[in-house]
Amino acid sequence: MLIVALTGGIATGKSIVAKTLQDLGCYVHHADQIAHQLMEPGKPAWKKIVSRFGEEILKPDKTINRIKLGAIVFSDEKKRNFINQLIHPLVLEEKKKTIDRLEKEGRHEIFVSEAALTIESGFAEFFDKIIVVFCQEEIQIKRLMERDNIDREEALRKIASQMPTEEKLKSADYAINSSGAVQSTVEQTEKVFLSLKSDHKRKQGINRDKDKTT
């Protein structure tokens, strides 16, 4: 199975690319969803986060108020690093478990991990290929303001907390510019998918050659 990372800055259109790849037959693993599960009440990550930030970040039902936590970590690099260093290794372990299961089932050729911080977390080498989604900065700011119902200053602060697009693109095997219409993003994704199919075939060939020499 080809192991692919789908990454990019906040509010750049990763979800559109992920949905398209899923519709084309890829297995899409959403890191955010796994992170949410890891932070459910009683889970080890939940306990460590509450111990670090206090019970004021909790809702009445004891779940973590992600808006409150986000406001704290986006404005403080040390606190943000604490969360990242806690959650990212746990999410990677869940990815590995899912990949092992899928390879045994044999129903998917391409595994796609949608995660905004793949490169920053230092896990880029784990993947066979990396797709970086990006868009023009003003479009990103506008999308983020509308999506999170925040002002421009807050949007800029969130964007600034992540690796600059130019740095992400240095690690990209494939780049998708989502600045235009949704259909343009979909068409670019479809082209990337065809390339990923070829990458998968090449990987299969390399693995077969390795098997012959062992």
Image (cartoon, grey):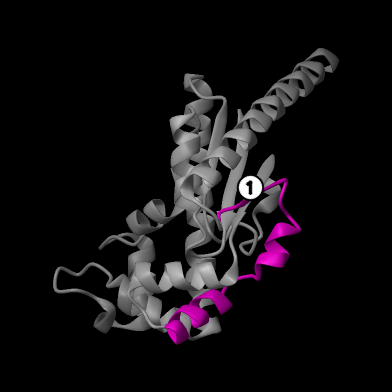
Rendering coords of residue 10 (x, y %) = 50, 65
Residue under the image location 51 percent in, 82 percent down: 157
Please, is residue 129 above or below residue 66 in the view? Answer: above
From this viewpoint, is residue 98 visible?
A: no
Q: Secondary structure at mark 1?
A: strand
The front one of 21 and 109 is 21
Rendering coords of residue 37 (x, y %) = 33, 54
Residue under the image location 47 percent in, 38 percent down: 20
The front one of 52 and 84 is 84
Residue under the image location 55 percent in, 54 percent down: 178
Rendering coords of residue 181 (x, y %) = 50, 51
Q: Which residues are magenta?
A: 152-178
Residue 171 falls inside the magenta stretch? yes
Tell me the kind of residue under disc 1.
Ile
Q: Quadrant of the N terminus?
A: top right
Q: Which residue is mark 1?
A: 131
From this viewpoint, is residue 189 visible?
A: yes
What is the quadrant of residue 129 in the picture? top right
Q: Quadrant of the C terminus?
A: top right
Q: From this viewpoint, which residue is outermost toward the top?
A: 212
Rendering coords of residue 155 (x, y %) = 46, 78
Residue under the image location 19 percent in, 70 percent down: 62
